[in-house]
Amino acid sequence: MTHIPGALASHATRGSAAIAAVLLASCGGGDGGAPQLPAARSALVPPEYTRPCPIKRSAIERLDVKGTGLAFEGASFGSVGTYTYTLAAATATVSPKDDCAATIVDLKNTVPDADGFVRYRFDVVLLAPTDAARGNGTLFYEVSNRTRSLLVPALNEGSSNDLFGNVQPQVSATGSGDVAGVGAGNGFLLNQGASIVWAGWQGDQPQTLTGATAAITGTQRWYAPGMTLPIAVDVANGNAPITGGVQDEFIADNATSNLLGTYYKMAPGALASATLTVRRTPTSAPITVASSAWAYTAGSGTAPAGSTGATGYGFVTIDRAAVRADAAYAAALDAGLDNGSIYQFNYTAVEPKVMGLGFLATRDLVSFLRHGTTDAAGNRNPLAGRVQTTLFGGISQSGRYVRDYLWQGFNADAQQRRVFDGMLPLVGGSRKTYTNYRWSKPGDYARQHETHYTPGDQFPFGYATLTDPVSGRTDGLLKKCSEDGTCPKVIQYDSPIEFGGARASLVATDGQGNDVAVPDNVRLFYATGTQHSPSQLAANARTQPDMTVTRSVAATSPTYAATVNNASTALVRALYLNLEGWVKGTAQPLASAWPSARAGTLAVPTGAAASLGGPDLSGVAFTGVAGTPGLAFNGVYNTLSLNDESVIPSAVSSKFYVVQLPTVDAQGNDVAGVKMPDSSVPLATFTGYSLRKSGFVAGDQYGLNGSQLAFAVTDALRQGGDPRRSVQALYGSKAGYVAAVGQSVDDLVARGLMLNGLYGADDATAYRNRAQSQIAQPGFAALP
């Protein structure tokens, strides 16, 4: 992996007053006059402007605390001691007449209060050492994933959405007694003294901290951070309601579900023109479903967007039996079934929210927590004087949000200061989010089969600024921050799912498949053989004690393949700690571990497994019974065309990007990247795809799932046609396997990719125990 130096991108330091004046002028502030933002292609999208243009007339007006108390039942964490939670509701302000207001879609179409400012509100959940003097000066902002906490529990080896529980994970060496972490888990972040914040950013998720008081208890372990946003109106036409076409999607993936929840309120009188269509694949022609086969029910609009109950915006009840029975829809079915068919509801909506304010909320909150003393109402900043370093991270949707936030230029606050010093986006691939748009759906994202044409996946894809050979545009995720000196250090982590599902190869290649140098302030890590969301070792040991067994799946599952059990949260902890040390100047950044076209570890797939260098495993049955389905490869992945996102649905062109997948070895496992022990000393083939079976649109990818197919323990137990070496051929004996795992652990620790007892994360011991547990399982009984 090649890195390119760049003082602005790497160091993001504030320059002299003269330099600052130049930076302000470049975005239209200061003496440079108002910015000359180009007109947007339509009202649905922001202008295509690649220079910095931070909003300056915005702030956190109030931070009203609803409750505080000891977190995790008052547990003490090393020398740091106890942690205190703070539950609050923030009120933020922004001027729709700010010079850069147009960078947030529809902000100019809001009605301000008498003082000229628009107000919006969002929930805030904070954790900090009870004794401020024992904190380490780091504030970690985890981007909630549809209001859930995923990254903090991954780092702490704990459980999601739980500020009450306190059970440490345990991996037994005896084959029994494994304990999954709960709540605080191993306390990795807490033992360091980090402060942690979550806040509402997704405008279609309602607030939960609306009462006068709030508390964390055994029955109320989490408050899902939501948001209340202003409704956009047509300011130029007397504040008339804004209406527009919206398309919502539904895929059942089972035989019974039949409710499609809408994401917006239907405009009055629009039901007559609404249509429901069905198609087999994203590229198939849609077939209009007769109105007799569906019915729309309006809701109150108080629940999260897309909800299918009476409190959602509305929902469509689909008579799927009628669709299956009518020959007119046969082309949209698979083996006569619609389990994986794509239903899309097209309607005229009203009252779009200004969703892009989610980015501003994140920016202004963290700036306030870092620099503020009190808010405008006199409420004290609960972290006043504590924050010297700020880190920003999230998993999946949240990782995409981190990338999007950076690209859209929100890492410069209202005073032109850098907001986040370090960023840790996980499993976002090359995508951003569908947030700063009119009629946006921040929870939707493009996959090979599901919501394939969702906006938020177009150029730029990587951090380096380059001219895209497909669109002709020049841009990069770091372009804006490189120009105003606010770039963070970045460590991006992805799994195999992101290469086939999120086109992760484009993070470090151009649109024609050529490698692109990665900026000096960025590191890329590919966790080979893992599932989309990093999984925990203790939890996996409980789910699958014996990795020599291929787990069965339910007969009703859309796929024959079991998902991947290959833990990688130990790697995530190591990367977090390295990012923090890199930012603070106490550690050198780890070297990237990422496949490349130049090294031959990326390739364009075809329908043959050999196109990626791997074996054909289509005849190796998941059940072990000859003639039953095996681990097939058909070259299907999430292709990417050049699309026009300024209309709904996106206008699709015939121009395509070159997307590549990692090459694999003779065992069917990835060649390049970071190999955790289950990948470097594998007992199974782990893939970044799971193919749908007949009746569920056979051959397309199934969501965010990978596949796992165990090796035979001995040559005598190998299925006919299985070209992979057996466990015995690979390791010889039980002792050989344990020794190989030990060597893998030692290597990862030496490279800084696994922790050995630091801050309560004794990952090295846990993996060694897991190896001892594995050889005690029945599958290893045949080995000497």
Image: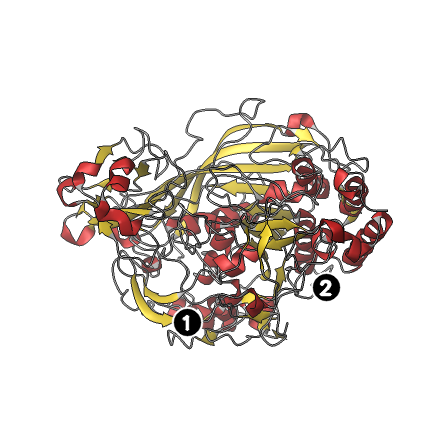
Asked whether the viewer can see residue 485, the reply is no
In the figure, 564 relative to 465: above or below? above
Quarter holding residue 781: top right
Which residue has dot 2 on it? Answer: 588
Viewer-nearest of discs 1 and 2: 2
Indicate the colouring scheme: secondary structure
**Residue 578 vs residue 622, the one in the foreground:** 622
Mark 1 to mark 2 CA distance (whole Å): 33 Å
Which residue has dot 1 on it? Answer: 26
**Residue 270 vs residue 768, the one in the foreground:** 768
* Residue 162 percent location from the top left of the image: 58, 32
**Residue 449 vs residue 195, the one in the foreground:** 449
How would you rate the neighbour count of disc 2 (Cα within 10 Å): few for under 14, some for 14-19, many for 20 or more? few
SS of the residue at dot 1? helix
In the figure, 467 relative to 198: above or below? below
Is 398 left, or right, of 181 in this rendering?
left
* Residue 186 percent location from the top left of the image: 71, 38
Q: Are marks 1 and 2 in contact (CB under 8 Å)?
A: no
- Give the amino acid type for the residue marked by disc 1 in the picture: Ser
Precedes in sequence: disc 1 or disc 2: 1
Quarter holding residue 490: bottom right
Asked whether the viewer can see residue 447, the reply is yes
In the figure, 5 relative to 197: above or below? below
How would you rate the neighbour count of disc 1 (Cα within 10 Å): few for under 14, some for 14-19, many for 20 or more? many
The quadrant of the picture occupied by the N terminus is bottom right
SS of the residue at dot 2? loop
- Give the amino acid type for the residue marked by disc 2 in the picture: Gln
* Residue 702 percent location from the top left of the image: 47, 49
Q: Which mark is residue 748?
A: none
Residue depicted at 19% across the width and 50% down the height: 234
* Residue 322 percent location from the top left of the image: 24, 37
